[in-house]
Image (cartoon, helix red, strand yellow):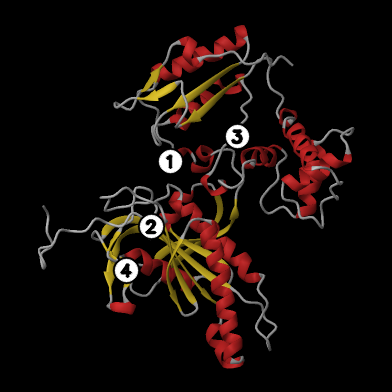
Amino acid sequence: MSTSGKSGAARPQPAGVCPSCGFTNPSGFRFCGECGSALTVGGERVGAAERRQLTVLFCDLVGSTRLATTVELEELRDAVRGFQSACTDVVRRFGGTVSRYMGDGILVLFGYPQAYEDAAERAVYAGLGMVEAVARLPPPAGTTEPLAVRVGIATGLVVAGDLIGVGSAEEEAILGETPNLAGRLHAAAPPNAVVVAATTRALLGERFLCEDFGAHALKGFADPVRCWRVVRPRSVASRFASAGDAQRTPLVGREDDLAWLLGLWRAVAEHGGRVGTLRGEAGIGKSRLAEALRERLGDGCVPMRFQCSPRYDNRALHPVTQHIEQAVMIAPQDPADAKLAKLVTWLRPDDAAYRLALLATLMSVPPEVAPPLPLMTAERRKRAAHELLGATERVHPPPRYSHTVRRSSKEHPFDARTDGKYRRQTTAERLHKVTNTES
């Protein structure tokens, strides 16, 4: 029996509920099975600090020192609280964790305690969201200048999870160059700007439009640090397109699987529609294999992508609305009236007026711009939405025959083998005829 070093008593079992994410763990777990953070025993943290790659965001309220000398203290308090509340709401929306409030500054972590493969992207979306949220806040009483925020973001290795301080002053420390760099970058950023380090910029690929912000001499860093200013998100067809050719790994050891998919395509031309599902553990290469099939077919097919994203797990129709945005070339920076005009071109001239109102609602066009949605029952609106979204083939007319390759970590007909390959099931198991999509 294991005993504690001081009392010799049996070591108590860790609590089942994770203090970070709330997941209920089986008895005996020392680390959360959901997010990986250390559990607690008797209110004390179990487990040592660990090295992690994190994306760290630091932001602060611009001109807070000047505000402290020009407005009443109560007004300053309300402004700082409003700033903190607005930024925290944005951080939660993109899965970040507020590590520390430092007066009018906030230190935010992405990738700890829960790791994300797109932590850098989440951090940048959060930074841009903070700029928008703070700009909507009313200025403090007695001033007319709107509130503004500066954001600095850096990615790198840190030591996370170590506890420092005593009693009520105890807090979890994040140590390393990365949080210091994020803090220095935010100081170099102009008001209402998001500035990122080179490590973060490399992870973003083509997902955002970034401007070279030059090399800056930052306090504590021997050499000038090159950084970029994020302007806005870009609309990309897939995560492979956003990563660019430089980050695309070569396809190795998947010749048999690719040959099977090409055979499936030939069967489509001869016999009609087919559905193929790729099944395997996360990171095994399902999306990469589907992309290789698209590259091999070239102009012989018209691809239609409906791609999910963990950032939109509360929006079931996001893959469809994203497809429509890309098809009618709606850009993230388009004003609401321009979005509406592009949606009008997608509909047929003989479509009922309520279809435009319904489509504008689905595409998040503000109600003050979108046409009014006629009164209808919830069931009628649901049927109308299904009919409307079922017409997405108008955007990209399919060829005479088409097929779909689905990528899933839970469905067959592909099973992941321990050697990292796919196990192909029998033809009867893996193929089923759906519908002939002759146009």
Q: Residue at x 38, y 51 (%)?
A: 24
Q: Are marks 2 and 4 in contact (CB under 8 Å)?
A: no
* Amino acid type of the residue tagged 4 in the rendering: Ala
Figure quadrant of the C terminus: top right
Residue, disc 1: 247
Which image quarter: residue 54?
Answer: bottom left
Q: Residue at x 43, y 40 (%)?
A: 247
In the displayed structure, does residue 147 sit left or right of residue 252?
A: right
Distance, label 2 to label 1, CA atoms, is 24 Å
Q: Are marks 3 and 2 in contact (CB under 8 Å)?
A: no
User: Which of these two is toward me, 71 or 329?
Assistant: 71
* Amino acid type of the residue tagged 2 in the rendering: Tyr
| Label 2 residue SS | loop
- Earlier residue among tags 2 and 1: 2
| Label 4 residue SS | strand
* Amino acid type of the residue tagged 3 in the rendering: Phe
Q: Are marks 4 and 1 in contact (CB under 8 Å)?
A: no
In the image, residue 300 sits, relative to residue 319, either above or below, namely: above
| Label 1 residue SS | helix
Mark 3, Cα crowd under 10 Å, few <14 / some 14-19 / many 20+, is some
The nearer-to-camera label among 3 and 2 is: 2
